[in-house]
Amino acid sequence: MAKLSPSILAADFSKLGDQAVKASKAGADYLHIDVMDGHFVPNISFGAGVMKSLNKYETAPYDVHLMIEDVDKYAADFVTEKTEYITIHQEACTHLHRSIQHIHSLGVKAGVALNPATSIMTLENILDDIDLILVMSVNPGFGGQKFIPIALDKIEELDAIRAENNMGFLIEVDGGVDLDNSKAIVDAGCDILVAGSAVFGADDIRKRIKDFKRIIG
Ligand code: DX5
Ligand code: ZN
């Protein structure tokens, strides 16, 4: 049974609280928090203050995706009572093992994201240290892009590696996820699907989440 993590990047920011509550009540397992710094990716989204403005609402826990350069400097800002995962990019970290240790020291779970061009072999030596691998199925920076199918091969490979080695990391997929491709993504071994425009772009957010949940189990 896979989980759904709607990305608030695609929400109407003028109604962020209402939309986050609506998505959570409809069955969203997490809220995906896409943080972009204009350096690691060619776009700026929002910072920890916007995420924290949701703390007073009853929402699903936060699944934070940091698309930023200086993760060691900013990760702590994203730790709240509702933060479950902080995911950082392999490509942004010179000392990835140290950054993962830093996130764990903050009391939250640590994820590592891989861009479409980055091989899963780059994580070979730290698979035991991470709680989640985020397979990017678009090049990060923007919502509403088209799913890159090579991501399915990566998910299958990761799923096989964790089965062979009895490992516990979760596999998350992010970018271009919609009702049409979500079954194939789950069948490949994905545990958490991120969907931005496919959820918040829908006329009826509640119904769209129910439709996703019916497909992904
Ligand atoms: C891309 C972000 C994704 C994206 C998802 O840089 O990390 O989370 O916003 O949005 P959709 O589902 O619209 O591709
Ligand atoms: Zn994301």
Image (cartoon, rainbow, N blue to C red):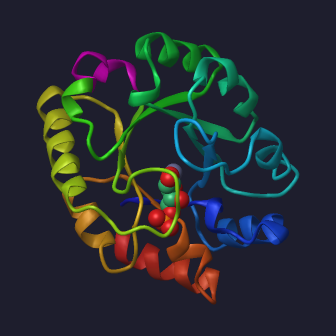
- Whether the magenta-drawn stretch holds residue 143 is answered as no
| Image position of 163 (left or right of 27) | left
Q: Residue at x 44, y 11 (%)?
A: 95
Q: Give the total of numbered labels.
A: 0
* 191 left or right of 185 in image: right
Viewer can see residue 217: no
Query: Is residue 66 or residue 83 the one in the foreground?
Result: 66
Q: Which SS does the magenta portion mostly show?
A: helix
Viewer-closest of 65 and 168? 65
Is the residue 56 above or below the residue 28 in the image?
above
- Quadrant of res 47: top right
Image quarter where the C terminus lies is bottom left
Q: Quadrant of the N terminus?
A: bottom left
Horizontal placement of 154 versus 80: left or right?
Answer: left
Magenta segment includes 125:
yes
Residue range in magenta is 123-130
Q: Residue at x 71, y 33 (%)?
A: 78
| Vertical comparison of 184 with 105: above or below | below
